[in-house]
Image (tube, rainbow, N blue to C red):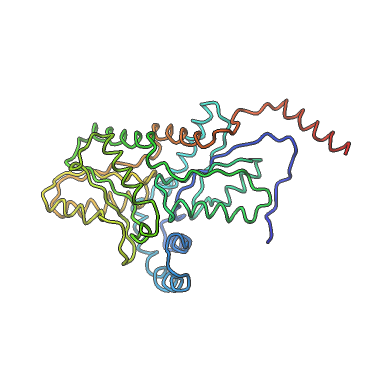
Amino acid sequence: MAFQQEPSFQHGQAPKTAVLYCNLGTPSAPTAPALRKYLAEFLGDSRVVEIPKPIWWLILHGIILRVRPAKSAAKYASIWTEQGSPLKAFTEQQAQSLGTTLQERGHHVTVRYAMRYGQPSIPEQLSALKAEGVQRVLIVPAYPQYSGTTTASVFDAVYRWGLKTRLIPELRFVNRYHDDPRYIAALATTVREHWAAHGQAEQLVMSFHGVPERTLQLGDPYHCECMKTGRLLAEALGLSKDQYKLTFQSRFGKAKWLEPYTEPTLIAMAQQGVKKVDVICPGFTSDCLETLEEIQQEAQEAFLHAGGESFSYIPCLNNHAQWIEALADISLSHMQGWDLSVPDTAALAASRARALAHGAKN
């Protein structure tokens, strides 16, 4: 196995710490070629699609990548901004704000963001951090609820990078924070702020990203963690069981996925006489295609067409100040025992000199 070129090792270096905040990813542009490249990487991940490789390769390259990129490009074009992909823009803002918050609290921590699919990639960012002398890295997925399809795939990318790295930094991983009180409180605040500005609807629909039902049967905790997030958020908002619904969106393919499905549920609610709904997507920490196009556009149209009168989408946590504070707390709780103070440069210089002198004697 060929190892990548290592930065030169120096004795007496101060341990540098970094947080790598990892989100799913995004195409580089709302075009068919960019979507084809992105979808090939995303749908080619065996964590995402658990079908035998030879069979899935034929389906993916023979059918899906010939048809889907143009359709997906049109959807992305409907939400694209001057800053590019909303997911990338919000993820970058979150990383910058997290770094600033940690610095303001007196902690010497570098914060970067990476994408599991697309750029900047996880291996690219880890190599850059190593080149800067970082020796300890906390991996923080942007997914509150753990799933093999998302969280574990981030860890896979880190491990594969490690296979080609001689001197691996000390690594820690945040698996989940679906029930962290600070995350729940930040969600509740965004809902209350929305209600204060727009009024409260008859029903609050909490829409989580779906996964195949088979993953639950195989032991994936995602479904249970979504249910707990929904219950805790409802409790924080003082909602009774008949005031909210928990659903799953973004179904792909013909297999049975976690139910109830979001759009059919909204249609049924409208047909049953519900006139006003608020919709929030608690499993997404950044607004993206699945929230801005699938929910705010497609699901809204379906609800109104079925007889509903008012559909109000509540934005994701994005760069909300309370969420950034919560993210800082969560990160610090996983960095306990690491010295995050600003290094004493004079003491380090003296230590390095002693190390060099000792090496010369031997």
Left or right side of 283 for 336? right
Left or right side of 273 for 125? right
Q: Quadrant of residue 66?
A: bottom left
Name the residue: 40% across, 54% down: 220
Q: How many marks?
A: 0
Position of residue 228 relative to residue 265, above or below, is above
Q: Nearer the viewer, residue 177 or 99?
A: 177
Name the residue: 46% across, 71% down: 57
Name the residue: 12% across, 53% down: 271
Q: Nearer the viewer, residue 229 or 252?
A: 229
Residue 216 image position (x, y, % from top left) = 36, 57
Q: Residue furthest left?
A: 273
User: Can you say which quadrant of the picture contains the C terminus?
Assistant: top right
Q: Nearer the viewer, residue 68 or 81?
A: 68
Residue 122 image position (x, y, % from top left) = 54, 50
Q: Residue furthest right?
A: 361
Name the residue: 33% across, 37% down: 187
Q: Quadrant of residue 355?
A: top right
Left or right side of 346 for 54? left
Position of residue 146 relative to residue 340, above or below, is below
